[in-house]
Image: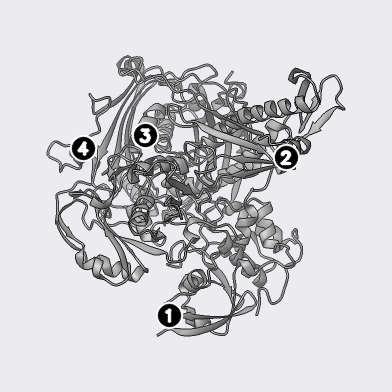
């Protein structure tokens, strides 16, 4: 049917990879290139009273020392509430406060040690459950709970009548699940090389996974039109969602604009692990009603996302999560309450499976608990409740090319599981 | 004692941004020797985008993928891409490629109509050639069109985009909306060995069946699944930046000595992948998204297998040896 | 105090000024502009900086540069002969093992040094041999399969001599 589609074509850039000739952003250097290092918040929540960079600027080999006052527009990210360099309060440990461009790393670090900074540790909150309480330390000025649609701190999904569904059930099964803070851990750490070309255009070689995604955000940070800013890259040493957030491009860019020289900002492994966006922690409480024959009559899910100190991509993750946390099962009575809580931690970035797979872990383990409760096989409960062609999902999304049943049947066969005949004959059609 | 257990999982996963509205553009420039330069700024971060993009353009033009060269390197010269995320690239760039290829074919026909002194409606395009329907021997190849057009000052570049439909505003009371037209589906069966003395879990057999629609490039799709297995195992068993969370994050991992990601020794002893290619009516050549879903089936299946093996539910990831041993000890006490 | 360091890099003599605290990886990347050995952690954890030093695979971020005086260092740039890929490189490419490719140069060097020592390994021995090289894309399966294929001779004989051994 197809000629090129379906072929095992080797990787377009594969020869470059096996010969070591592929060039990644972290490999780049330029004549006269400066090195960037930053001073980061030492506390989970820090009030910054006063910064004096005079002595730092005097260190021989230092070209520029910048604070938030040097950033043309200091807000960035998908939900632009994150600061390029912290202003009066740094809301998580490791947040960038001051940046230096110097001839080499040791000079940059020496300059940072000369920055005079007066700061104070503020009360902080790490536990998202604690952060929801009224007397919790305030992570963000607008409150610790995200407000949806300007009215409600709960993002709701409602389908059918859960109370009726629970009443119809033979059993009620409840579970609580947590997923941890996780790191993308690409083997190449984040790197930027920013410079002004001969005509004053700012060029940034970036490890971003979205050249244009980042371009739009950065043009705002630098207050530059799109013909004065060029992003270069698109061959990077792993991302897994972590490079949807800007970690170095903004600071390197401001320093290049300031100094007129090429500036490289390349994170160490420690910085990458400790201070960049993460897959943040989530908690799910699931309550299910199930009949003895294996039909799920109702499901209620309480979703809690620990978003960290800035929204970054955490809002998008919650939106996506509530759309899919019901699972690949037809459930007519379903209610979901999602909450996004701010805590004094690294902001929530995107990570492969973004917003969905953490919920799928909870929901699929819960499904096994249901099967064990009523004594049917884990295949049967899934096949009995599976979506079929033309169904709509829990938020009214029409489903086409549905294969829940078929993938289960096939994987059973691969694993040598002989399903009862009625299940072998089932179909999504 | 080593105890074996089996767990399964079954999921679906959307293709593209939540709620749609995430466009991409593609340009296809015909060069004087008949090769084609494609641009689109999707990032190559290991998923195999470039090969897949060339294959889809080649398919749309009925030529070999070796005719296509792709540049994704920068925002000055490469066509727009919204982002490389959300399992969107194959699907959306593919659909944009099909549209751009149609545009290039139209332009080539217009040029050929002038060269062959006929009306454009008399011409057809197939497999790298424009020819007269009435007399197929009157034809022009890509190279002939490319060189003729280039040196007569005609710029033949097909270009177009694709926009996944924007979801209707969600109903405030119910949250109803249409987040994605196309869904991928997947299921896993996983066998684990749990050492009840050490709490160590080892993945023994891993069977995956995924419906990612038409598989554009099986080699890179398998690579995605292999990687999904490894990352899924990492998420299920090892990875935790702050083991004392939510009480505190003072203990925080800062390197690969403390933050454990899987190595070659952690891959399953036996791993099998099959694709159930359920043609997606909206996708390019029937394809759906792949990248993210293939790392999502493993964690629940592993946790379910641990219960099957030793009778404890691991309700917080990851299932570290310490956690398993504590759960086993609690279990013993309660019996 | 900086010192002039002389060693053999990919079969060619090189002379470079190195500081006592500098690692071989720093000298290769920053002084000799050879960026095929990657710096993924600088802690000896990830293996992306693996090179072959006097026939043995080492993590170049863990080697003090001045200690390689007079020795032979081979990076992935030194593999392959007459414009042909080394069998390990060819196998990795054809098996589709590299994904993002950042770990690949280190993985090639680890596999090459291993096969020189153990030309007929078992599957488990290959998994052990690559365990010091992290691949976050998780392409281990195809890397291990490709090394087994090279060991079975599917990609021709492994060239012996100056490009790998000293």
Q: Nearer the viewer, residue B286 or B251?
A: B286
Q: Nearer the viewer, residue B73 or B168?
A: B73
Mark 1 and mark 3: Cα distance apart in space:
48 Å
Left or right of residue A111, residue C132 in this image: right
Q: Nearer the viewer, residue A401 or A115?
A: A115
**Chain letter of disc 2?**
B
Residue C153 visible in the displayed image: yes
Mark 2 and mark 4: Cα distance apart in space:
64 Å
**Chain letter of disc 3?**
A
Give the number of the mark in front: 2 or 1: 2
Instruction: Kindly indicate the quadrant of the structure image that contains residue A129.
Output: top left
**Chain letter of disc 1?**
C
- Which residue occupies the extreme front position in the image? B152
Q: Which residue is mark 2?
A: B151
| Mark 3 crowdedness (10 Å alpha carbons): few <14, some 14-19, many ≥20 | some
Residue A5 visible in the displayed image: no
Left or right of residue B226, residue A361 in this image: left
Q: Say the numbered circle drawn on residue A316.
A: 3
Determine whether label 1 and label 4 are within 8 Å by CB. no
Left or right of residue A237, residue B248 in this image: left
Q: Which residue is mark 1?
A: C19
Disc 1 element: loop
């Amino acid at each position: 049917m197809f000629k090129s589609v379906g072929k095992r074509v080797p990787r377009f850039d594969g020869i470059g990879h096996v010969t070591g000739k592929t060039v990644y952003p972290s490999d780049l250097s330029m004549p006269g290139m400066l090195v960037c290092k930053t001073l980061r918040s030492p506390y989970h929540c820090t009030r910054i009273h006063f910064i004096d960079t005079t002595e730092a600027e005097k260190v021989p080999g230092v070209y520029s020392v910048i604070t938030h006052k040097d950033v043309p527009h200091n807000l960035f990210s998908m939900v632009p509430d994150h600061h390029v360099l912290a202003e009066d309060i740094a809301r998580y440990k490791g947040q960038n406060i001051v940046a230096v461009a110097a001839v080499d790393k040791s000079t940059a670090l020496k300059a940072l040690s000369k920055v005079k900074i007066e700061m104070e540790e503020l009360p902080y909150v790490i536990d998202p459950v604690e952060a929801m309480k009224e007397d919790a330390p305030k992570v963000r000025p607008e409150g610790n709970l995200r407000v949806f649609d300007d009215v409600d701190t709960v993002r709701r999904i409602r389908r059918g009548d859960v109370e009726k569904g629970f009443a119809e059930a033979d059993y009620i099964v409840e579970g609580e699940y947590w997923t941890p803070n996780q790191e993308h851990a690409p083997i190449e750490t984040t790197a930027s090389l920013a410079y002004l070309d001969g005509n004053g255009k700012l060029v940034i070689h970036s490890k971003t996974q979205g050249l244009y995604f980042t371009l739009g955000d950065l043009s705002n940070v630098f207050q530059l039109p799109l013909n004065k800013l060029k992003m270069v890259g698109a061959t990077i040493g792993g991302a897994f969602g972590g490079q949807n957030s800007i970690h170095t491009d903004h600071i390197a860019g401001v320093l290049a604009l300031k100094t007129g020289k090429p500036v490289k900002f390349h994170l160490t492994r420690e910085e990458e692990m400790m201070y960049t966006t993460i897959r943040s922690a989530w908690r799910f409480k699931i309550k299910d009603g199930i009949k003895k024959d294996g039909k799920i009559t109702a499901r209620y899910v309480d979703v809690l996302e620990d978003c960290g100190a800035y929204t970054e991509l955490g809002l998008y993750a919650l939106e996506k999560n509530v759309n899919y946390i019901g699972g690949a099962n037809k459930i007519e009575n379903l209610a979901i309450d999602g909450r996004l809580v701010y805590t004094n931690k690294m902001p929530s970035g995107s990570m492969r499976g973004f917003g969905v797979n953490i919920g799928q872990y909870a929901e699929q383990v819960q499904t096994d608990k249901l099967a064990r409760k009523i004594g049917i096989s884990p295949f049967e409960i899934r096949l009995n409740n599976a979506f079929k062609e033309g169904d709509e999902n829990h938020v009214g999304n029409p489903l086409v090319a549905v294969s829940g049943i078929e993938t289960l049947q096939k994987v059973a066969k691969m694993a040598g599981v002989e399903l009862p005949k009625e299940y072998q004959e089932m179909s999504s059609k | 004692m080593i105890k074996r257990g089996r767990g399964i999982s079954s999921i679906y996963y959307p293709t593209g941004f939540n709620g749609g509205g995430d466009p991409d553009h593609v340009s296809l420039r015909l060069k004087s020797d008949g090769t084609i330069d494609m641009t689109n700024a999707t990032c190559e971060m290991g998923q195999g985008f470039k090969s897949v993009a060339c294959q889809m353009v080649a398919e749309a033009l009925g030529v070999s993928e070796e005719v296509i060269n792709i540049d994704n390197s920068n925002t000055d010269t490469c066509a727009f891409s919204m982002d490389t995320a959300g399992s969107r690239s194959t699907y959306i760039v593919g659909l944009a490629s099909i549209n751009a290829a149609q545009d290039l074919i139209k332009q080539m026909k217009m040029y050929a109509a002038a060269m062959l002194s006929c009306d454009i409606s008399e011409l057809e395009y197939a497999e790298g050639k424009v020819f007269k329907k009435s007399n197929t021997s009157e034809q022009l190849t890509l190279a002939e069109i490319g060189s003729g057009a280039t040196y007569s000052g005609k710029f033949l570049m097909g270009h177009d985009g694709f926009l996944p439909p924007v979801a209707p505003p969600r109903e405030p009371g119910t949250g109803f909306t249409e987040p994605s037209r196309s869904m991928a589906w997947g299921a896993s069966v996983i066998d684990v060995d749990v050492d009840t003395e050490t709490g160590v879990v080892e993945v023994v057999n891993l069977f995956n069946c995924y419906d990612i629609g038409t598989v554009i490039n099986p080699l890179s799709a398998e690579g995605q699944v292999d990687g999904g297995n490894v990352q899924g195992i990492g998420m299920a068993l090892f990875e935790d930046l702050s083991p004392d969370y939510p009480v505190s994050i003072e203990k925080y991992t800062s390197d690969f000595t403390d933050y454990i990601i899987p190595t070659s020794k952690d891959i399953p002893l036996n791993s099998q992948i099959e694709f159930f290619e359920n043609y997606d009516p909206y996708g390019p050549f029937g394809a759906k998204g792949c990248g993210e879903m293939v790392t999502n089936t493993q964690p629940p299946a592993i946790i379910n297998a641990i219960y099957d093996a030793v009778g404890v539910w691991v309700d917080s990831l990851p299932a570290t040896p310490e956690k398993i041993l504590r759960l086993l000890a609690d279990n013993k006490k309660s019996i | 105090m900086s010192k002039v360091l002389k060693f053999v890099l990919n079969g060619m003599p090189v002379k470079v000024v190195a500081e006592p605290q500098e690692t071989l990886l720093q000298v290769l990347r920053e002084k000799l502009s050879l960026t095929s050995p990657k710096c993924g952690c600088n802690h000896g954890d990830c293996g992306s900086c693996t090179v072959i030093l006097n026939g043995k695979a080492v993590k170049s971020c863990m080697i003090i540069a001045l200690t390689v005086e007079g020795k032979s260092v081979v990076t992935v740039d030194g593999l392959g002969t007459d414009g042909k890929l080394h069998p390990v490189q060819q196998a990795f490419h054809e098996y589709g093992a590299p994904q993002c490719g950042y770990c690949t140069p280190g993985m090639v060097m680890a596999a090459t040094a291993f096969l020189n020592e153990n030309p007929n390994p078992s599957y488990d021995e290959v998994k052990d041999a690559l365990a010091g090289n992290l691949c976050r894309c998780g392409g281990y399966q195809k890397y291990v399969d490709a090394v087994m294929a090279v060991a079975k001779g599917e990609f021709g004989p492994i060239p012996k001599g100056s490009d790998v051994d000293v």
